Amino acid sequence: MADLEARLALICLLLLSAQIRTVGAEEEEPVRVMCLGAVDNQVAPYISWFRQEPSITGHYVPSRFYESGWSGVFGERILRSVRMYFPRTYGQLVDYDFLILDSPVVSYFGDDGIRWMKRAIEEGEVGATTMNSLLSKHQFCFLPFLLSELSDCFPNDGIRVAEYSGGLGVEKLSMKIGTPYSGSFRVRLNRETPPVFTPFLGLGLENFVGGGGYLMFQRPGALVWIWSVGNHPEIAPEVPYLMSWEYGKGLTWSLSDNLRHGWWGWDMPAETHVVSENPYGLDVLVNWIRHGTGREPIQDIPVFHNLRTSYGYYDDLRGMVYSVIDFVSSFGGRTIELEMRVLGTDDTVRDSKLLYMKNELEAAQERVDLALAELRAITDDSVSLKDETFLWIYVTQWTVVTATGMICGFALWTLMVRRKIYRQVSTTRRSS
């Protein structure tokens, strides 16, 4: 009965927490970002990174899949994903603030979806970016994009890139990538741009080495924010790495790279890349998105970086705690008290994120540090509970095995050694 009451209390606390989260989200109005293409955790950091950043909420439309390589189309999976996750009306789409096109196969979004995205940029003031120059070097991905009206929205001259790299008819573009994943470039920031990326100059951003980086050509009127140096010497000593321009009411961007390549400091689990020592990938992305949606970029990078790192560490530690709790629970251990304590730390972290959104950074750091300290204590207690649960399992198993051995030994001794229950077999006399 007591366990049932505890479970009901846990459910009530969960519902209350959900209500608090909803109110906080409406009050703070985080940036709503839709990520399309290769967006799952195995191939991109969007999901894990946006969990660390309170000012961004992510929505994900998987529309490019990796299975032992990038050459597979997986049309049925993409269609099913688009039907499930992509907005069904233009009004729903324009509610988002920023679109990230990371290698989606745009033909599966249909004429309406492509038209809505262009209209959202041109009329709805929605920011957007493409990755990998033309989204991909594979024809089934880059060609539908280049032939669509959506490609007109971005500052990269895609037709020129394709013509230089083999033409529209080739199955796979030769985009002069240099030596992919081999540490082939560094970046140089444009000092004459607004302070979006220049706050990272003092943190050594230009010293980190990256690998890959596809070719881009800027359209007239495009602004280059970052150049890559050394990976396209046949073109120029430095070429555009990130650039933007205004298209209608929206600000759009083109990146020659993507976040799973090494310069961003995130390693794609499905492939082996040379990973940069750049710890500021998420911080660069956040400033980029904030400026792209008309918000003020963050200037005090180290303070915000430490907070985001704490939120990421909390998520990792929380996942480990729940793994132990689930494991102990499967063996019948009483974990309700630990679960209630974890919910308490969740509330503390939620308070910290609200303070973060109000720019009360010192108080936000104190709250998340408090949650981390409590979560470490919960981790120790969960391990102790696991050990206690296993002790009783071992005692029970030892008792059962010992009792079984004693019964078997007694039976063996009675039947085979004493043999008093048996009669001597007499010799029968053969009849003559």
Image (tube, rainbow, N blue to C red):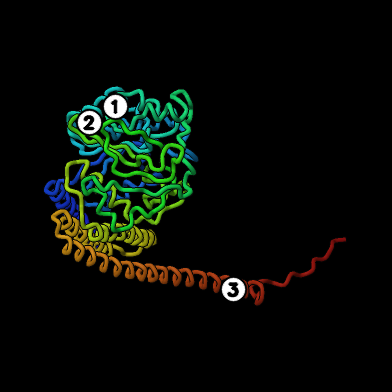
| Left or right: 231, with 48 as reference point | right
> Could you say which is closer to the camera, residue 198 or residue 88?
198
Residue 1 visible to an observer of this rendering? no
Is label 3 or label 2 in front?
2
**Residue lying farthest right?**
432
Q: Position of residue 340 (x, y in %)?
A: 24, 62
| Left or right: 308, with 398 as reference point | left
Residue 289, quarter of picture: top left
User: Upstream in the sequence, badge 1 or badge 2?
Assistant: 1
Q: Quadrant of the N terminus?
A: bottom left
Q: Disc 1 marks which amino acid?
A: Asp
Residue 139 visible to an observer of this rendering? yes
- Which disc number belongs to residue 409? 3
- Crowding at dot 3, Cα within 10 Å, few <14 / some 14-19 / many 20+, comes out as few
Q: Position of residue 332 (x, y in %)?
A: 36, 62
User: Upstream in the sequence, badge 1 or badge 3?
Assistant: 1
Q: Disc 2 marks which amino acid?
A: Tyr
Q: Position of residue 238 (x, y in %)?
A: 38, 42
- Residue matched to label 1: 152
Q: Is residue 144 above or below residue 213?
A: above
Q: Position of residue 167 (x, y in %)?
A: 45, 25
Is label 1 or label 3 in front?
1
| Left or right: 195, with 270 as reference point | left
* Pointer 1 with pointer 2, Cβ within 8 A: yes
Q: How far is disc 1 from disc 3 in space, using C-alphas?
A: 86 Å
Q: Is residue 95 above or below residue 323?
A: above
Q: Is residue 76 above or below residue 356?
A: above
> Could you say which is closer to the camera, residue 236 or residue 311?
236
**SS at mark 3 in the image:** helix
- Which disc number belongs to residue 247? 2
